[in-house]
Each structure stands twice: as structure tokens, then as C-alpha cells.
Amino acid sequence: MTGKKKENKAPAKGKVLVYRNRVEVLLEKDTVWLSLNQMADLFERDKSAISRHLRNIFNGKELIRNSVVAKIATTAADGKIYQVEYFNLDAIISVGYRVNSKRGTQFRIWATNVLKKHLVDGYTINEKRLIASEHKYQQLKQSLKLLSNVVHIDGVSDEAKGLIEVITQYSRALDVLDDYDHERLSVPKGIKRSKFKLTYEKARKIIDALREKFKSSALVGREKDKSFQGSLGAIYQTFDGLDVYPTVEEKAAHLLYFVTKNHSFVDGNKRIAAALFICFLDRNGILYRKDRSQRIDNNALVALTLMIAVSKPREKEMMIKIILNLLV
């Protein structure tokens, strides 16, 4: 062995796709390939800027160059054939989360929506579809890990970091869901002594404060019926003298679930559910861990509330277990 690195073989000529932006994409071996010129066209930046981002990606060991680059014989405008370097989807995504342009922003929004759709459709609507193949499941987790690494790189815009963080908050949820589907998910131990009881009057004060924040909608927090009082009463219900939901965490989980699903308000049901959930955890002294990190941050809470909203009634137990495990 000479120690020379083995270069990634060029993919055989595959199918060419034309997107709305008129960039031709080579599709081969479950990935897409773009040349430097094509990436410059896609993100509407100079080739020098794209080259600089790629150089930083490889120098930082985020990606191994020989794993994501292939040389492909390409016929130029002069009729001559040249060996041109093409970059696969991993490299394209990494550049997309660095480039500062309107098209780069559009790409990041598109990538975020695609991954969110994978997660919602794959797990909430039909969770077995995504994990039918363990290989595909691991690929998705690897992609999330790749994106999470970008957050810590200097020069990445705050807007890009925000989008990445929204996506990577799902990574923990993926593990929890995988545990559930493999019957490894259990109800973790919680705190049984509650410091704070959420009464209807206290809840209304929290909701009224929320209404002040959303003055543009007069319907936020307007109750349709008495079902909200029923939701609050449900988390404190007892049987044979014992709490049905004995721990603070179980009460909090059911509070989030009941308020989200019961639609007691004309508008703002999910916002109210999330606000009450956070206040309940905070006033019971369990919103933060010992290292002062929040047990469930705002982005993860948004994702969780949306999952509950679109879940089916038969999935209630799964939703509650997911909430409890994310609070660990």
C-alpha cells in the first residue's frame, strides 16, 4: 500500500432532472451531483465563494473530500471532454447552509420543510413507513447530525443557525420514537410532590397575559365552552384516593395533550397549551436541569405541540410517553 487515498469513483451517467431554477442535476446511486458551476448557479454566488465554503467544509473535517467528490467526463462548449469534479448531496447541503444569498435562504427553508415533512409524515401520520428500513432510519439520523455540526461553525448566519436548530431538535424525538416502536420506551420516574397547583383562575391569568402579546387576534383565549375547565380538572383526577397521574411530569404531559387536543378556545389552542405547559413546569421547579439547561426548549416544544395536534386519539399513550421521555 502506498498510502494514497482511494478516490470516490464517478457515478455512471444517470438521469438528469431539471428543476424550476433550470439547474440540471445528475441523479445517481440515491444521491444528486452538482459541479462547482452548477452550485454557483443554484445559490446565485460566485464560484470563488462556493469554493471557499467547500474548502472550509473539508478543512474542518465536516465531510471527507473523497467521499463526496467524483470526477465525471463532461463535454464543454468547445466540444472537448474534460474531467470535471461533481459534489454529492451532502456537500450541496453543507454549502447551502453557509451561503449568504436570497437563493441560499430559499434552499434552507426548502430543506427545513422537507425534513419536517419526513418526520411528520413518517412518524405521526404513518410512523412505520420511515423505520421500515433500519438503514433509511440511520441515514436520516446521520443527516440530522450533519446539519447540527453546522451550528458551531463560525460565519454561519443566525438565520441559518435558527433553521438548523429547528431541524436538529427532532433528533432526540427520533430516538424516543424508535424506542417506542421497538417497545423500549417506558414511563420514566418523576417527581410526586407538586409545589404548584394550576387552578382555573391561575390558568386564566397566564392566558390573559398571552392575549396581551397577541393583541392582533381578539379571538385568542376566548373559550368556546366549559371544556377547558374539564382539561384542568382531568390532570388532578383521582381514583380510590390516589392521583391517576401521580407525578408532576405526568400532569404536565397530560396538560399539554388535553389543552392541545380539546380545542377549548376559538383561537390560540396550541399557543395556550404550550404556555401553560412551560409555566406549570417552571412553577413546579422542573423546567430546568441542574446545569440550568431547559429540559425542553421552545423549538422542540413547537414540534411536540404540532405532533400532538395532528396525532390520532389512539396515539395518546404514545404522545404522553414521548413528552415524558423528552423531559428526562
Image: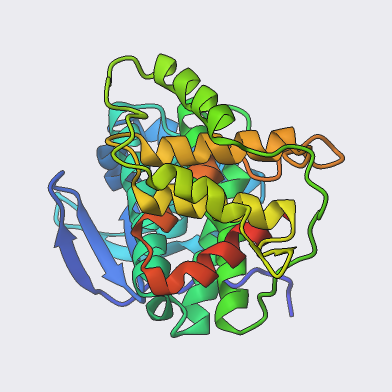
Figure check: 144 above or below 188: above
The residue lying at 43 percent from left, 17 percent from top is 213
Q: Is residue 107 left or right of residue 159?
A: left
Name which quarter of the figure residue 100 lies in.
top left
The residue lying at 12 percent from left, 47 percent from top is 20
The residue lying at 81 percent from left, 42 percent from top is 289
The residue lying at 17 percent from left, 62 percent from top is 17
Where in the figure is residue 95, as x and y percent of width and height?
45, 43
Towards the viewer: 80 or 72: 72
Towards the viewer: 52 or 126: 126
Where in the figure is residue 211, as x and y percent of width and height?
40, 20
Q: Is residue 41 left or right of residue 223?
A: left
Towards the viewer: 103 or 144: 144
Q: Is residue 40 visible?
A: yes
Which quadrant is home to the N terminus? bottom right
Where in the figure is residue 165, as x and y percent of width and height?
54, 41
Q: Is residue 168 visible?
A: no
Where in the figure is residue 5, as x and y percent of width and height?
64, 68
